[in-house]
Amino acid sequence: MSAQQENRTAATHRVVILGAGYAGMAAAIQLAARTRKQRDTVQVTVVNAQERFTERMRLHMTATGRTLAAMSVPEMLEGTGARFVQGWVTAVDAAARTVRVDDDRVVPYDTLVYALGGVSDTSGVPGADDYAYTLSGVEDAELLAGRLETLSGGNGSGTVVVVGNGLTGIESAAEIAERYPHLDVVLLGGEEPGATMNGRAAAHVRAALDRLGVRVRSGVEVVKVLAGSVELAGGESIAADAVLWTGGTRVAPLAAAAGFEVDGRGRIVTDRALRSVSHPEVYAVGDAAAISQGYGVMHGTCQGGMPTGVHAALSIVRVLGGKAPKPFRFGYYHTPVSLGRGDAVVQFTRPDDSPRRICLVGKAAVRYKETVTASPWPTYGRMKKMPASGAFWPRGGRFTR
């Protein structure tokens, strides 16, 4: 990008979106579509480290060597008028309203959408950062895939320990066990797998893990990761040829370093319109935002991330038009979990994410889960032509008032 391209013009309002994940892409496409006739006065720029779009909902598949379709961010933005800048965001200067990319480029903004999502948090346990694999991105998942292929060569044996028995841990353990049945897969965590589901859904999760040969250890805490083992609180050691860490996420310290008000996990604290409470020209979406609803602070999922991106775009359009932004409201509605390629569970939820009595299991759940996982691409395509089509999601009723 030339200096001339980055110079500010008095007639142009520059909106810079940091991150092209599910939420960032939703914000970019929605905003570009709604300002299509204002391209001379509204400039939308997307900054992302890679051209490839990361399908976070399929990283457990990448980690087992399955080949997925390559999604290109520039191709997804094609026809919208949004510009794409490839590079790592290394700093944000809130006073000057600039973003530094790769330490040698400066991108100015009038409005910023902060969508730099989370990565696996390996900072709290000694050795996790050095010896554990993560699913923070495609490259990380591919590293694990290479290790698993080495272990399974010639029907070889080995032990894979998955730390964290939340949804990512469950999906990963099931995928690895199904793909590499000769490997011993151990799933460790504080709670029972499926603890947030109703009785039938949780029982199906446990039965599927048992069928796949996954050894589940609940009520345990990993206190150290070594080159060939993990240590538990109490002194027990479990041998491991590979360790996958899925126990929690963290966000980059960029927001805190920029002076934005953040919560204890480094997420930008937002007002009801998704603006930073300390810097109203900054919107935070997806995993990078601490968004309060009537039931509490939202947790990071694609089902909530894309609506935050769309709402940020709608808010920006309203402000540019001289109107006040509307409050964001969102209620959860499901928790889909794959259990290998041929099995799954879908737990339907109340808006506060507590389980309903209704759930799907087996083949019906597999079809539902795949529909959900593949839904962002047609949604983005529809938004290019009909931006209003992206503005429908459960508002949560009494749970979010």
Image (spheres, grey):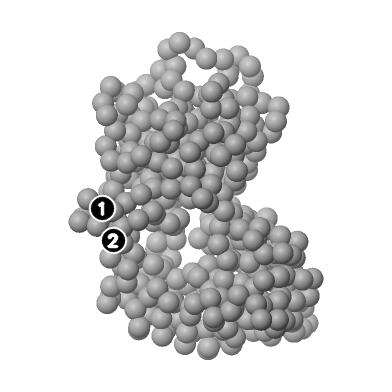
The residue at the point 33 percent across, 29 percent down is: 317
- Name the one closer to the observer, 73 or 329: 329
Give the quadrant of the N terminus.
Answer: top right
Between marks 1 and 2, how big is the CA–CA gap? 8 Å
| Relative height, residue 80 to residue 182 (above, below) | above
Q: Residue 109, percent across and down?
A: 51, 24
- Name the one closer to the observer, 256 or 131: 256
Q: Residue 373, percent across and down?
A: 44, 61
Q: What's the mark number on residue 351?
A: 2
Choose top left, top right, bottom left or bottom right for residue 247.
bottom right
- Circles 1 and 2 in contact, beta carbons < 8 Å: yes
Choose top left, top right, bottom left or bottom right for residue 370.
bottom left
Q: Can residue 320 be spotted in the picture?
A: yes
| Relative height, residue 76 to residue 101 (above, below) | below
Q: Is residue 15 left or right of residue 364?
A: right
Badge 1 or badge 2: first in the primary sequence: 2
Report the number of discs: 2
| Amino acid, disc 1 | Thr
Choose top left, top right, bottom left or bottom right for residue 147.
bottom right
Q: Which residue is mark 1?
A: 400
